[in-house]
Amino acid sequence: MKFTVMVNEGPYQHQASDSAYKFVEAALAKGHEIFRVFFYHDGVNNATRLTTPPQDDRNIVNRWSELAAKHNLDLVVCVAAAQRRGIADADEAKRNGKDANNIAPGFRISGLGQLIEGGIQSDRTIVFGA
Amino acid sequence: MSDEMMEGGTQKKFCYVNRKAPYGTIYAWESLEVVLIGAAFEQDVSLVFLDDGVYQLTKGQDTAGIGMKNFSKTYAALEMYDVEKLYVERESMEARGISEEDLLVDVQVLSRAEIADLMEEQDVVLSF
Protein backbone atom coordinates (compact mmCIF):
# COMPACT_ATOMS: atom_id res chain seq x y z
CA MET A 1 0.00 0.00 0.00
CA LYS A 2 1.13 3.55 -0.68
CA PHE A 3 1.07 5.99 2.25
CA THR A 4 1.40 9.72 2.78
CA VAL A 5 2.17 10.64 6.37
CA MET A 6 1.52 14.04 7.93
CA VAL A 7 3.37 15.19 11.07
CA ASN A 8 1.75 18.13 12.84
CA GLU A 9 3.67 18.53 16.09
CA GLY A 10 7.23 19.36 17.04
CA PRO A 11 9.77 16.85 18.36
CA TYR A 12 10.05 16.05 22.11
CA GLN A 13 7.11 18.31 23.04
CA HIS A 14 4.64 15.80 21.58
CA GLN A 15 4.65 12.14 20.64
CA ALA A 16 3.36 12.74 17.09
CA SER A 17 6.79 12.68 15.44
CA ASP A 18 7.86 9.53 17.33
CA SER A 19 4.63 7.75 16.39
CA ALA A 20 4.93 8.82 12.76
CA TYR A 21 8.54 7.61 12.65
CA LYS A 22 7.60 4.24 14.11
CA PHE A 23 4.72 3.96 11.66
CA VAL A 24 6.93 4.73 8.67
CA GLU A 25 9.61 2.32 9.87
CA ALA A 26 7.04 -0.47 10.36
CA ALA A 27 5.32 0.19 7.03
CA LEU A 28 8.62 0.03 5.16
CA ALA A 29 9.59 -3.18 6.98
CA LYS A 30 6.33 -4.73 5.75
CA GLY A 31 7.14 -3.75 2.16
CA HIS A 32 4.75 -0.79 1.87
CA GLU A 33 5.62 2.39 0.04
CA ILE A 34 5.90 5.80 1.72
CA PHE A 35 5.04 8.32 -0.98
CA ARG A 36 5.84 11.31 1.20
CA VAL A 37 6.14 12.55 4.79
CA PHE A 38 4.76 16.07 5.12
CA PHE A 39 5.63 18.28 8.09
CA TYR A 40 3.13 20.98 9.05
CA HIS A 41 2.28 23.27 11.99
CA ASP A 42 5.03 22.88 14.64
CA GLY A 43 5.92 19.64 12.86
CA VAL A 44 8.33 21.73 10.78
CA ASN A 45 10.57 21.85 13.87
CA ASN A 46 11.46 18.23 13.17
CA ALA A 47 13.60 19.54 10.33
CA THR A 48 16.20 21.69 12.11
CA ARG A 49 19.70 20.22 12.25
CA LEU A 50 20.47 22.50 15.23
CA THR A 51 18.50 20.18 17.51
CA THR A 52 20.75 18.99 20.33
CA PRO A 53 19.02 16.54 22.67
CA PRO A 54 20.80 15.05 25.70
CA GLN A 55 23.08 12.17 24.70
CA ASP A 56 21.00 9.55 26.47
CA ASP A 57 17.88 10.50 24.51
CA ARG A 58 16.85 9.66 20.94
CA ASN A 59 17.79 12.20 18.28
CA ILE A 60 14.48 12.64 16.51
CA VAL A 61 15.81 14.86 13.71
CA ASN A 62 18.82 12.67 12.89
CA ARG A 63 16.60 9.63 12.99
CA TRP A 64 14.39 11.08 10.23
CA SER A 65 17.46 12.08 8.18
CA GLU A 66 18.95 8.59 8.49
CA LEU A 67 15.69 6.88 7.55
CA ALA A 68 15.34 9.19 4.55
CA ALA A 69 18.85 8.36 3.36
CA LYS A 70 18.32 4.64 3.80
CA HIS A 71 14.94 4.46 2.03
CA ASN A 72 15.12 7.50 -0.24
CA LEU A 73 12.16 9.06 1.60
CA ASP A 74 10.63 12.35 0.49
CA LEU A 75 10.52 14.49 3.66
CA VAL A 76 8.72 17.74 2.83
CA VAL A 77 8.48 20.76 5.12
CA CYS A 78 5.69 23.28 4.45
CA VAL A 79 7.26 26.56 3.38
CA ALA A 80 4.67 28.85 4.99
CA ALA A 81 4.77 27.02 8.31
CA ALA A 82 8.59 26.89 8.13
CA GLN A 83 8.95 30.61 7.50
CA ARG A 84 6.85 31.43 10.58
CA ARG A 85 8.98 29.19 12.76
CA GLY A 86 12.45 29.94 11.40
CA ILE A 87 13.17 26.78 9.45
CA ALA A 88 15.14 27.61 6.31
CA ASP A 89 17.24 25.95 3.65
CA ALA A 90 19.96 27.83 1.76
CA ASP A 91 17.57 29.18 -0.89
CA GLU A 92 14.94 30.26 1.62
CA ALA A 93 17.54 31.95 3.83
CA LYS A 94 18.88 33.88 0.86
CA ARG A 95 15.44 34.80 -0.45
CA ASN A 96 14.37 36.14 2.95
CA GLY A 97 17.64 37.88 3.75
CA LYS A 98 18.61 35.60 6.65
CA ASP A 99 22.18 35.03 7.78
CA ALA A 100 21.90 31.27 8.20
CA ASN A 101 19.93 28.17 7.34
CA ASN A 102 19.17 25.19 9.53
CA ILE A 103 17.51 22.47 7.50
CA ALA A 104 18.60 18.92 8.27
CA PRO A 105 19.79 16.50 5.56
CA GLY A 106 17.04 14.65 3.75
CA PHE A 107 14.38 17.33 4.24
CA ARG A 108 13.21 19.73 1.57
CA ILE A 109 11.03 22.83 1.79
CA SER A 110 8.03 23.07 -0.50
CA GLY A 111 4.39 24.10 -0.64
CA LEU A 112 1.12 22.77 0.74
CA GLY A 113 0.30 21.43 -2.72
CA GLN A 114 2.70 18.61 -1.87
CA LEU A 115 0.35 17.48 0.91
CA ILE A 116 -2.70 17.54 -1.35
CA GLU A 117 -0.79 15.70 -4.07
CA GLY A 118 0.22 13.12 -1.46
CA GLY A 119 -3.43 12.63 -0.55
CA ILE A 120 -4.37 12.18 -4.19
CA GLN A 121 -1.52 9.84 -5.07
CA SER A 122 -1.55 7.62 -1.97
CA ASP A 123 -3.91 4.86 -0.92
CA ARG A 124 -3.99 6.21 2.64
CA THR A 125 -3.06 9.50 4.29
CA ILE A 126 -2.20 9.16 7.97
CA VAL A 127 -2.19 12.24 10.23
CA PHE A 128 -0.08 12.35 13.40
CA GLY A 129 -0.79 15.09 15.91
CA ALA A 130 -3.28 17.98 16.00
CA MET B 1 0.66 19.63 -10.42
CA SER B 2 0.45 17.15 -13.29
CA ASP B 3 -1.68 17.76 -16.37
CA GLU B 4 -3.77 14.75 -15.51
CA MET B 5 -4.74 16.25 -12.16
CA MET B 6 -5.51 19.63 -13.72
CA GLU B 7 -7.87 17.90 -16.13
CA GLY B 8 -9.67 16.33 -13.21
CA GLY B 9 -8.31 12.88 -13.98
CA THR B 10 -8.04 12.07 -10.30
CA GLN B 11 -10.66 13.33 -7.89
CA LYS B 12 -10.82 12.29 -4.30
CA LYS B 13 -12.99 13.22 -1.35
CA PHE B 14 -11.00 15.47 0.99
CA CYS B 15 -12.41 16.27 4.42
CA TYR B 16 -10.91 18.93 6.66
CA VAL B 17 -11.91 18.45 10.29
CA ASN B 18 -11.65 21.59 12.40
CA ARG B 19 -11.79 20.95 16.13
CA LYS B 20 -10.14 23.93 17.76
CA ALA B 21 -11.11 27.51 18.60
CA PRO B 22 -10.00 30.08 15.99
CA TYR B 23 -7.41 31.83 18.14
CA GLY B 24 -5.25 30.64 21.02
CA THR B 25 -3.55 28.15 18.73
CA ILE B 26 -2.65 28.37 15.04
CA TYR B 27 -4.45 25.19 13.95
CA ALA B 28 -7.57 26.91 12.59
CA TRP B 29 -5.65 29.44 10.51
CA GLU B 30 -3.16 26.92 9.13
CA SER B 31 -6.04 24.57 8.34
CA LEU B 32 -7.65 27.34 6.30
CA GLU B 33 -4.35 27.81 4.45
CA VAL B 34 -4.43 24.14 3.42
CA VAL B 35 -8.05 24.49 2.26
CA LEU B 36 -7.21 27.55 0.14
CA ILE B 37 -4.17 25.95 -1.50
CA GLY B 38 -5.96 22.63 -1.87
CA ALA B 39 -8.83 24.29 -3.74
CA ALA B 40 -6.57 24.64 -6.79
CA PHE B 41 -6.48 20.84 -7.08
CA GLU B 42 -10.22 20.64 -7.82
CA GLN B 43 -10.95 17.81 -5.43
CA ASP B 44 -14.29 17.04 -3.72
CA VAL B 45 -13.83 19.10 -0.55
CA SER B 46 -15.85 19.06 2.69
CA LEU B 47 -15.16 21.08 5.83
CA VAL B 48 -16.35 19.80 9.19
CA PHE B 49 -16.51 21.92 12.32
CA LEU B 50 -16.88 20.24 15.69
CA ASP B 51 -15.85 20.61 19.33
CA ASP B 52 -14.46 24.16 19.83
CA GLY B 53 -14.01 24.30 16.04
CA VAL B 54 -17.57 25.59 15.81
CA TYR B 55 -16.32 28.91 17.22
CA GLN B 56 -14.32 29.40 13.98
CA LEU B 57 -17.58 30.25 12.20
CA THR B 58 -19.17 32.57 14.75
CA LYS B 59 -20.11 36.16 13.88
CA GLY B 60 -18.60 39.18 15.56
CA GLN B 61 -15.03 37.99 16.02
CA ASP B 62 -12.79 40.81 17.21
CA THR B 63 -9.06 40.18 17.49
CA ALA B 64 -7.96 43.77 18.10
CA GLY B 65 -6.99 43.03 21.69
CA ILE B 66 -4.75 40.04 20.94
CA GLY B 67 -2.80 41.35 17.95
CA MET B 68 -3.80 38.50 15.67
CA LYS B 69 -5.30 38.67 12.21
CA ASN B 70 -9.08 38.25 12.15
CA PHE B 71 -9.44 35.67 9.41
CA SER B 72 -13.12 34.91 9.97
CA LYS B 73 -14.14 36.68 6.74
CA THR B 74 -12.16 34.09 4.81
CA TYR B 75 -14.82 31.47 5.56
CA ALA B 76 -17.41 33.56 3.73
CA ALA B 77 -15.03 33.75 0.74
CA LEU B 78 -14.60 29.97 0.46
CA GLU B 79 -17.48 29.87 -2.00
CA MET B 80 -15.28 31.65 -4.53
CA TYR B 81 -12.85 28.77 -4.25
CA ASP B 82 -15.66 26.30 -4.95
CA VAL B 83 -15.50 25.11 -1.36
CA GLU B 84 -19.20 24.93 -0.60
CA LYS B 85 -19.73 21.93 1.66
CA LEU B 86 -19.51 23.17 5.24
CA TYR B 87 -20.83 20.91 7.99
CA VAL B 88 -21.23 21.74 11.67
CA GLU B 89 -21.91 19.16 14.35
CA ARG B 90 -25.20 19.79 16.15
CA GLU B 91 -24.04 18.39 19.50
CA SER B 92 -20.99 20.69 19.53
CA MET B 93 -23.18 23.72 18.81
CA GLU B 94 -25.72 22.81 21.47
CA ALA B 95 -23.06 22.20 24.10
CA ARG B 96 -21.79 25.73 23.49
CA GLY B 97 -25.14 27.48 23.19
CA ILE B 98 -24.54 28.36 19.53
CA SER B 99 -27.34 28.39 16.95
CA GLU B 100 -27.21 28.74 13.17
CA GLU B 101 -28.02 32.47 13.43
CA ASP B 102 -24.73 32.95 15.27
CA LEU B 103 -22.73 31.68 12.28
CA LEU B 104 -21.33 33.89 9.53
CA VAL B 105 -21.80 31.42 6.67
CA ASP B 106 -24.48 29.03 5.50
CA VAL B 107 -23.76 25.57 6.81
CA GLN B 108 -25.41 22.22 7.00
CA VAL B 109 -25.95 21.11 10.59
CA LEU B 110 -25.47 17.37 11.08
CA SER B 111 -25.71 15.10 14.08
CA ARG B 112 -22.62 13.39 15.46
CA ALA B 113 -23.75 10.13 13.84
CA GLU B 114 -24.22 11.84 10.47
CA ILE B 115 -20.76 13.41 10.73
CA ALA B 116 -19.36 9.94 11.37
CA ASP B 117 -21.10 8.67 8.22
CA LEU B 118 -19.71 11.61 6.26
CA MET B 119 -16.17 10.85 7.44
CA GLU B 120 -16.62 7.21 6.50
CA GLU B 121 -17.20 8.22 2.87
CA GLN B 122 -13.98 10.24 2.62
CA ASP B 123 -10.73 9.28 0.94
CA VAL B 124 -8.56 11.73 2.88
CA VAL B 125 -9.39 13.13 6.32
CA LEU B 126 -7.09 15.86 7.60
CA SER B 127 -7.74 16.88 11.21
CA PHE B 128 -6.77 20.17 12.75
Image (cartoon, coloured by chain):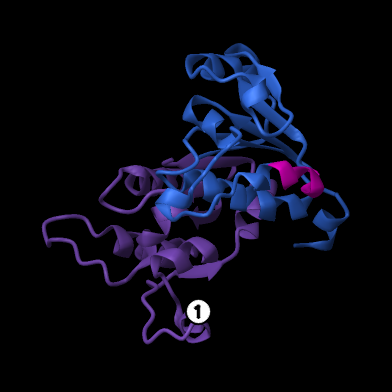
Chain colours: A purple, B blue
Mark 1 nearby-residue class (10 Å; few <14, some 14–19, many ≥20): some
Residue named by callout 1? A92
Q: Quadrant of residue B60?
A: top right
Q: Nearer the viewer, residue A2 or A59?
A: A59
Q: Nearer the viewer, residue A40 or A62?
A: A40
Q: In the rendered structure, which amino acid carries the disc numbered 1?
A: Glu
Q: Residue at x 71, y 27 (%)?
A: B107
Quick check: B101 left or right of A56?
right
Q: Residue at x 51, y 17 (%)?
A: B97
Quick check: B38 left or right of B30?
right
First to last magenta residue range: B76-82
Q: Position of residue B21 (x, y in %)?
A: 47, 36
Q: Quadrant of residue B83?
A: top right
Q: Nearer the viewer, residue B95 or A108?
A: B95
Q: Position of residue A21 (x, y in %)?
A: 38, 49
Q: Nearer the viewer, residue B84 or B39?
A: B84
